[in-house]
Amino acid sequence: VQLQASGGGLVQAGGSLRLSCAASGSIDVRDRMGWYRQAPGKQRELVASFTSGDRTNYAGSVSGRFTISRDTAKNTVYLQMNSLKPEDTAVYYCARMGLSPKYNIWGQGTLVTVSS
């Protein structure tokens, strides 16, 4: 397993969670890394990513509430999620991003459930 995600769970609306994604093998978190999510019946969407260098990008729906970060010493990427909303409920996936999503290397998902 090259990407191991953890940290999901059940939280009330307004609460916080921090997801972790530990990388191993050939993956270095200094690469282009991202967090995606997929809600039931919806397509997988990119919510946060490192683009070039330390630049970050966020989906409009999470901007100001979610923060992506990484610890290169631990080769781990994080997603801090604050002010969670029921619509944030989804399976969250970390990925080493390729030139297009079909070239992504995916971790297993971690379920986040936000209750109202």
Image: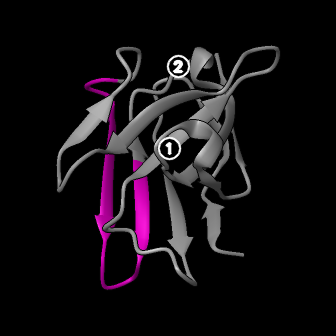
Furthest residue toward left: 54
Front-most of 95 and 64?
95
3D distance between C-alphas at marks 2 and 1: 17 Å
Q: Examine the structure image and report whether residue 69 is included in the region drawn in magenta.
A: yes
In the rendered image, which quarter is residue 44 located in?
top right
Q: Is residue 103 something one can see in this rendering?
A: yes
Question: Which circle's residue, 2 or 1, is located before the other in the chain?
Answer: 1
Q: Residue 103, image x and y in percent? A: 60, 48
Residue 108: percent from left, percent from top: 73, 56
Q: Amino acid at mark 1?
A: Trp
Which amino acid is tagged 2? Lys
**Over which residues does the magenta segment extend?**
63-79
Residue found 70% across the figure and 19% down from its top: 43
Name the spot of residue 115 as percent of width and height, x first.
67, 23
Q: Residue at x 46, y 25 (%)?
A: 14
Task: Give the SS element for disc 2.
Answer: loop
Whether tag 2 and tag 1 are in contact, CB under 8 A, the answer is: no
The residue at the point 21 percent across, 49 percent down is: 52
Q: Which residue does the numbered mark 1 point to in the structure image?
A: 35
Q: Nearer the viewer, residue 80 or 101?
A: 101
Residue 75 included in the magenta stretch of the image: yes
